[in-house]
Image (cartoon, grey):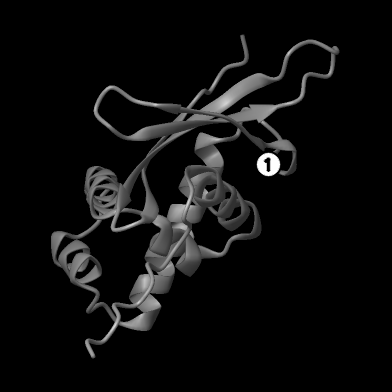
């Protein structure tokens, strides 16, 4: 009898992944947030960190998962703060997961919407782009909408 492979870890739907992502940003659950990023998403985050002055040696330790706890904690705290700034056009607690749609490259996008105060359609605060790997959905990037309009 062969051993069964373990079930995939992480959200099994794009909506569940996006809900977990928003929850992690709102509540500052930085380790959960990092776990939700795909390898490409992590590379994108580290590249943004490098543009902001992240030491390349630290970035490589983070990429490899070998950074000391304090270093990783500091980096992830900065990541949470950066994502909160990206979503600052909305009250974080008001953000809801909106429509889910496929992308041209085979991924999926999920809109982050905020109810309108004027009884109109909700407005889009950003879009989370996701991909699936072995049945687990992961965040590739957040495209924030910084201005209501």
Residue farthest toward the front in the current orientation of the protein: 1
Q: Which residue is found at the position 49% from the left and 65% from the top?
A: 32
Reply above or below: 91 against 50.
above
Reply above or below: 2 against 132.
below
Reply above or below: 33 against 65.
above
Residue farthest toward the bottom in the current orientation of the protein: 1
- Decide which of 5, 103 is in the foreground and name it: 5
Q: Locate residue 99: give its quadrant.
A: top right
- Decide which of 115, 137 is in the foreground and name it: 137
Q: From the image, which quarter does the N terminus lie in?
A: bottom left
Q: Which residue is found at the position 22% from the left and 51% from the top?
A: 43
Identify the element where label 1 is drawn: helix
Q: Which residue is found at the position 15% from the left and 65% from the top?
A: 60
Q: Callout 1 environment at 10 Å: few (<14), some (14 to 19), or many (20+)?
A: some
The residue that mark 1 highlights is: 92
Q: Which residue is found at the position 62% from the left and 54% from the top?
A: 23
């Amino acid at each position: 009898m062969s051993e069964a492979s373990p079930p995939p870890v992480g959200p099994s739907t794009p909506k569940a992944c996006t809900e977990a992502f928003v929850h992690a940003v709102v509540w500052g659950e930085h380790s959960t947030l990092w776990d939700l990023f795909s390898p490409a998403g992590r590379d994108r985050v580290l590249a943004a960190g490098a543009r902001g002055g992240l030491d390349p040696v630290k970035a490589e330790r983070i990429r490899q998962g070998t950074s000391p706890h304090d270093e990783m904690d500091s980096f992830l705290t900065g990541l949470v703060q950066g994502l909160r700034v990206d979503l600052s056009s909305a009250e974080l607690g008001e953000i809801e997961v909106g429509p889910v749609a496929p992308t041209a490259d085979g991924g999926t996008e999920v809109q982050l919407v905020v109810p309108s105060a004027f009884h109109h359609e909700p407005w889009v605060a950003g879009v989370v782009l996701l991909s699936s790997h072995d049945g687990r959905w992961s965040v590739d990037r957040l495209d924030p909408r910084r201005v209501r309009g």
